[in-house]
Image (spheres, rainbow, N blue to C red):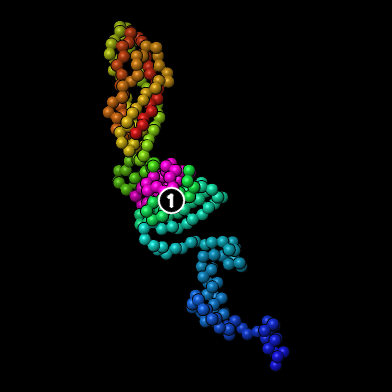
Amino acid sequence: MLGFVNGHLTQTAGAYAASAVSVADTGNLLTAGIVEAALTEVLGAFSGSHFRDNETSAGQHKAILQPVLGAGRVLLLDTQGAGGAAARLRLYADSDSVWFILNAAWNGSAWARDTTGAAAGGFRLSRNEAEFLHDASLTATFASWTRTLRLPLSSTASNTSFELAGSVREVGRLGLQYSNSDTVAHDNLSGGGSVTFRSRFPTAPSSITLSPYATSGSFVGNPTVMVPDRDGFAFYSHQNLQGLAATYWFGSYTAVA
């Protein structure tokens, strides 16, 4: 009898089938009551999101399906990539947007920087707009981003440029050229133009500085800036020209808001 018992414990041929062995499940983690059904249940749960060893791409993920994870802004993904502040990526979602964030985590009321002394950044996508985010305050936590570029998409006639928030500095080009086709001199000839900023400023510029790149010797002064707003500004100049003469001014603008 002892030999039969030992053979039953040590030899596969004499062991009980998995369908005849019960599962204690003290943690109450399974619905199955026997080993065979428990193995099927565990493998079914694994293969729901992974490829099995007997399938192509064994062990790799299939589509990741998640239920509602909570209220407010919830964490979907946290990966350190190759390490370092630039590689720490988190993916969040709230009721309106999905957030892709580098070097910062949402603590429920503010963004907490992983590496103090390094900038944080990212972008946000929603059904109605897209927005790039940047914070250079270098503080341990921050409630709002120091600079953003937002592209609104909800209007039937949306602006095609980004709307900026935070400190802004833009450099661009402008120019004027005059020609007097008459044989006699003409004074106070008027010329002008306008500039459209690449992105919409948060407010009208606090300063616009014009700097010449190339001018003719007869051009007097710099053009005058007028009616600046969030989208751009106009400029003009009055010049005196001798008969059959020409003059020009080509340069750059630096706008700060």
Residue at 55 percent of width and 50 percent of height: 83
Q: Quadrant of residue 249?
A: top left
The magenta segment is 118-145
Observer able to see residue 101: no
- The residue furthest bottom is 1
Residue denoted by label 1: 112
Residue 240 vs 198, above or below: the answer is: above
As drawn, the residue found furthest toward the right would be 3
Give yes or no for residue 175 being in the magenta stretch: no
Rendered location of residue 70, percent (x, y): 39, 62
Quadrant of the frame with the C terminus: top left
User: Would you place residue 244 above or below residue 4 in this image?
Assistant: above
Residue at left offset 56%, top offset 76%: 39
Q: Amino acid at mark 1?
A: Ala
Within 10 Å of disc 1 (Cα), the crowding (few <14, some 14-19, many 20+) is some
| Quarter of the picture holding the N terminus | bottom right
